[in-house]
Image: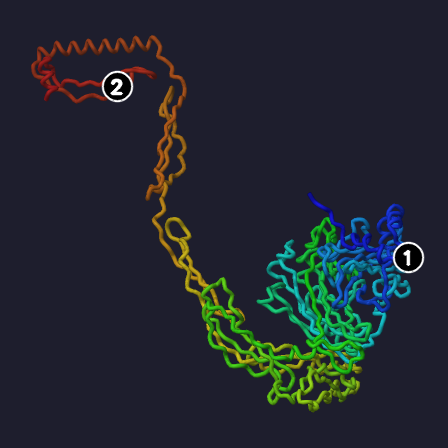
């Protein structure tokens, strides 16, 4: 027996509004339910408001003042720490409408996370929570209505404990109007300029969640990956990408090829509007556990002018699908810097390729379409297709955390202590929890500190896993890291200043020739002995952007940040790049270098031999009789990050079992012979030969000769005349024989001649008689005749 539970926002609505809403009695509720429907009941409810109340906020991504008809926008409802909410409702109305009629609602919502949000059963145009629990943020997509709708009011209600907040003005209501046709193509920009002071430094960490387990349909097992992350911190005057906009060539190359080169070139060409280029390595394969591979991250800075950040990365292989953030504002309305941003990401289509599945062949979209989020109803062959139109399962999450603030801050919110000292404080090592089943070598010496100044750095040591006695018990890491500072610096010295990292170098003061640039840092912890910090907080150096400023010289950008060292230990190479902004005016070739390389040193490499398990038992022979093969294996027990192992992990050898039985083999049957008679009944035969005699218990040979009856034609009988002649011949022979017998009595001695040949058969067909004769050489009596026979 089941019980249907309404969402918390709906269930508490009737319970709490009589306590907090003005003029909203049970009679009014009942009347509204009958006459206006559930949607209008929700919209008419007004909660108690407090002046300056802004714990909760409703935000449209990018804070656009205008919407483009048909475009999609991400809408976020959030609570500022430590506030939270248990339930909510979200609805979109045409300006001036009360929601009494279906036509009063504007646009449509799309669910992103079904575990967090769902459509109201009694008011399908509104969004509410899926389950009542504590939460600090929800997100949905809102698709703008058709042209001619006018301004739209997005409204949210918040249920916190037994109090409902529903504001017609303020942070829970957003007004967004239709973009005028005269301004079509103009990028929506944040409404407010940033009023924060100083600068802030952030770390972006990307967590991919796209795998065969989470997205099994047509998952590309061999080639799945995330491309290199590319983005920047920038001003409102430059937009890398946005929903409803068209992809630039740089965005297209990331979306289709996973190449960030053109995108980085476009970013660096906007040097005045960009503070930091954001880059992180690609991930092959797309997903691995965090204990195997750390999530990619990148650090960047923002200031009052360049307070937005955008990035994108390709989901590959795919036609032109990406994830990312567009114009994420890190400046708060109270003139501070956002402490943390967590965004769940679904893929979006760049509008440059019309493929429908991961590995679809190239099919350019002509004309190019606008950037839009993918949906579960795009195409039945799409890997995200859902015939019921459900939400697309999230493919990634990005976390943006503030790690430092520099300079005098103009808001009153103090730094969190974690921002000040936690990242510099030496980590206290816990007691050694190495399992007894893990046998290690001694730790190697500590490497040199990665910092040569009083800035924070790291040093590393390694050890070798010699044996893992129990494979079911995991062994801890073979590498250990420790915070450190350069020579002459000590965080234990009471007179030492704790300094922040250097902020990125400012742009060169000139665009051609020699100028200056500067960078700054600030004191994160003053000396414990109360002395003043004498460590410099600002550095200035000369910079040359373009050595020559003649018509025959080309203008280039400043050098970008150095790439990571090509080696993980020992000596490697690192590179940095710059772009050509303008070719020589006289049409000559540009001779400026755009790439620079230099050596880089990483901690010393330690050679660690392969650690292998014992050989397994030989497998069964690959055959059941005769000659075959058998194999055995062993496992690599060394950690993969310690280097390649060239030892063989599998062996094979021949094996011999008793001979297999050999069955008899014969040729095919010959043709049937001719019938053995010329008339009447007879027989025919056919034969076959033995090719292989049976051996080792094989099947015996069957018959090799077969007979079958045959009948040619009926035989004809002889005439009466022939019979008389035959009878007369017989009588004549008898009389002659009798005469010979009489003569033998008169001639006692006789000599006999040899037997004659057999006579012909007495009949032409059927039974007959053949005869032969013996003749005497001289006349003799019968007794002599007999004696002659005996001789």
In the rendered image, the quadrant that contains the N terminus is top right
Q: How is the image coloured?
A: rainbow
**Residue that sits furthest to the left in the current view:** 748
Q: Residue at x 14, y 18 (%)?
A: 776
The residue that disc 2 covers is 759
The reply to whether residue 554 is visible in this rendering is no
Mark 1 or mark 2, earlier in chain: 1
The reply to whether residue 90 is visible in this rendering is yes
x and y percent of residue 106 in the render?
86, 55
Q: Is residue 294 left or right of residue 304?
A: left
The residue that disc 1 covers is 148
Which residue occupies the foreground of this view, 97 or 134? 134
Tag 1–tag 2 contact (CB < 8 Å): no
Pointer 2 local density, CA inside 10 Å: few below 14, some 14–19, many at least 20: few
Which residue occupies the foreground of this view, 309 or 194? 194
Residue 702 quadrant: top left
Pointer 1 local density, CA inside 10 Å: few below 14, some 14–19, many at least 20: few
In the rendered image, the quadrant that contains the C terminus is top left
Q: Is residue 782 above or below residue 106?
A: above
Which residue occupies the foreground of this view, 318 or 364? 318
Q: Is residue 742 above or below residue 371?
A: above
Q: Residue at x 82, y 60 (%)?
A: 165
Q: Is residue 716 above or below residue 1?
A: above
Asked which secondary structure carries label 1, the reply is loop
x and y percent of residue 463 in the render?
50, 75
Asked which secondary structure carries label 2, the reply is loop
- State the separation of the CA atoms marked 1 and 2: 129 Å
């Amino acid at each position: 027996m089941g019980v249907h539970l309404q969402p918390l926002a709906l269930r508490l609505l009737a319970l709490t509004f009589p306590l907090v809403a003005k003029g909203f009695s049970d009679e009014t509720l009942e009347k509204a339910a009958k006459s206006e429907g559930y949607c209008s009941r929700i919209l008419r409810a007004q909660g108690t408001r407090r002046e300056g109340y802004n714990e909760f906020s409703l935000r449209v991504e990018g804070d656009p003042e205008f919407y483009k008809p048909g475009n999609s926008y991400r809408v976020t409802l959030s609570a500022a720490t430590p506030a939270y909410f248990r339930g909510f409702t979200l609805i979109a109305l045409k300006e001036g409408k009360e929601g009494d009629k279906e036509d009063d609602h504007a646009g449509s919502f799309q669910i992103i996370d079904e575990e967090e949000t769902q459509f109201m059963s009694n008011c399908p145009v509104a969004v509410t929570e899926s389950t009542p629990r504590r939460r600090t943020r929800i997100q949905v997509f809102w698709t703008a209505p058709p042209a001619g709708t006018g301004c739209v009011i997005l409204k949210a209600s918040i249920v916190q404990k037994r109090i409902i907040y529903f504001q017609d003005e303020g942070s829970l209501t957003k007004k967004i109007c239709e973009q005028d046709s005269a301004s079509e193509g103009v990028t929506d920009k944040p409404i407010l300029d940033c009023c924060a002071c100083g600068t802030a430094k952030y770390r972006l960490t990307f967590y991919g969640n796209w795998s065969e387990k989470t997205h099994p349909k047509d998952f590309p097992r061999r080639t799945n990956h995330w491309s290199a992350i590319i983005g920047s911190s920038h001003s409102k005057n430059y937009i890398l990408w946005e929903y409803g906009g068209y992809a630039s060539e740089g965005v297209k190359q990331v979306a289709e090829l996973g190449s960030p080169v053109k995108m980085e070139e476009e970013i660096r060409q906007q040097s005045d509007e960009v503070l930091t280029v954001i880059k992180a390595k690609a991930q092959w394969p797309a997903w691995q556990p965090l204990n195997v591979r750390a999530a990619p991250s990148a650090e960047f800075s923002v200031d009052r002018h360049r307070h937005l950040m955008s990035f994108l990365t390709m989901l590959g292989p795919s036609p032109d699908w990406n994830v990312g953030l567009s114009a994420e504002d890190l400046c708060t309305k109270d003139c501070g810097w956002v402490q943390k941003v967590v965004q769940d990401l679904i893929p979006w289509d760049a509008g440059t390729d019309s493929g429908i599945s991961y590995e679809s062949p190239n099919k350019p979209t002509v004309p190019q379409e606008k950037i839009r989020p993918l949906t579960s109803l795009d195409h039945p062959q799409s890997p995200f297709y859902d015939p019921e139109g459900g939400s697309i399962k999230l493919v990634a999450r990005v976390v943006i955390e503030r790690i430092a603030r520099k300079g005098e801050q103009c808001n009153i919110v103090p730094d969190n202590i974690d921002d000040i000292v936690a990242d510099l404080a030496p980590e206290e090592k816990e007691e050694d929890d190495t399992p007894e089943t893990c046998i290690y070598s001694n730790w190697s010496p500590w490497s040199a500190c990665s910092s040569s100044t009083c800035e924070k750095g790291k040093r590393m040591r390694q050890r070798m896993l010699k044996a893992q006695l129990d494979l079911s018990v995991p062994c801890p890491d073979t590498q250990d890291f420790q915070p450190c500072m350069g020579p002459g610096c000590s965080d234990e010295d009471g007179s030492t200043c704790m300094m922040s990292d250097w902020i990125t170098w400012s742009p060169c003061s000139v665009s051609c020739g020699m100028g200056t640039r500067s960078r700054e840092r600030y004191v994160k912890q003053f000396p414990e002995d109360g002395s003043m910090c004498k460590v410099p907080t600002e550095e200035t150096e000369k910079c040359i952007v373009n050595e020559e400023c003649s018509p025959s010289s080309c203008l280039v950008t400043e050098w970008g940040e150095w790439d990571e060292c090509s080696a993980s230990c020992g000596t490697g190479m690192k590179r940095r790049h710059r772009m050509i902004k303008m070719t020589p005016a006289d049409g000559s070739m540009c001779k400026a270098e755009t790439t620079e390389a230099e050596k880089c040193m990483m901690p010393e490499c330690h050679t660690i031999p392969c650690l292998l398990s014992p050989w397994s038992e030989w497998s069964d022979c690959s055959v059941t009789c005769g000659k075959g093969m058998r194999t055995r294996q062993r496992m690599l027990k060394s950690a993969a990050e310690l280097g390649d192992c060239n030892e063989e992990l599998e062996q094979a050898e021949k094996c011999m079992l008793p001979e297999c039985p050999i069955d008899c083999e014969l040729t095919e049957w010959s043709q049937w012979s001719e019938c053995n008679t010329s008339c009447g009944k007879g027989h025919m035969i056919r034969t076959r030969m033995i090719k292989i005699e049976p051996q080792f218990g094989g099947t015996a040979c069957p018959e090799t000769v077969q007979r079958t009856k045959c009948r040619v034609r009926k035989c004809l009988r002889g005439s009466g005349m022939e019979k008389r002649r035959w009878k007369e011949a017989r009588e004549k022979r008898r009389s002659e024989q009798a005469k010979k017998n009489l003569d033998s009595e008169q001639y006692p001695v006789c000599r006999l001649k040899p037997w004659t040949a057999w006579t012909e058969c007495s009949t032409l067909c059927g039974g007959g008689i053949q005869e032969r004769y013996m003749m005497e050489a001289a006349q003799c009596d019968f007794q002599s005749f007999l004696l002659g026979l005996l001789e």
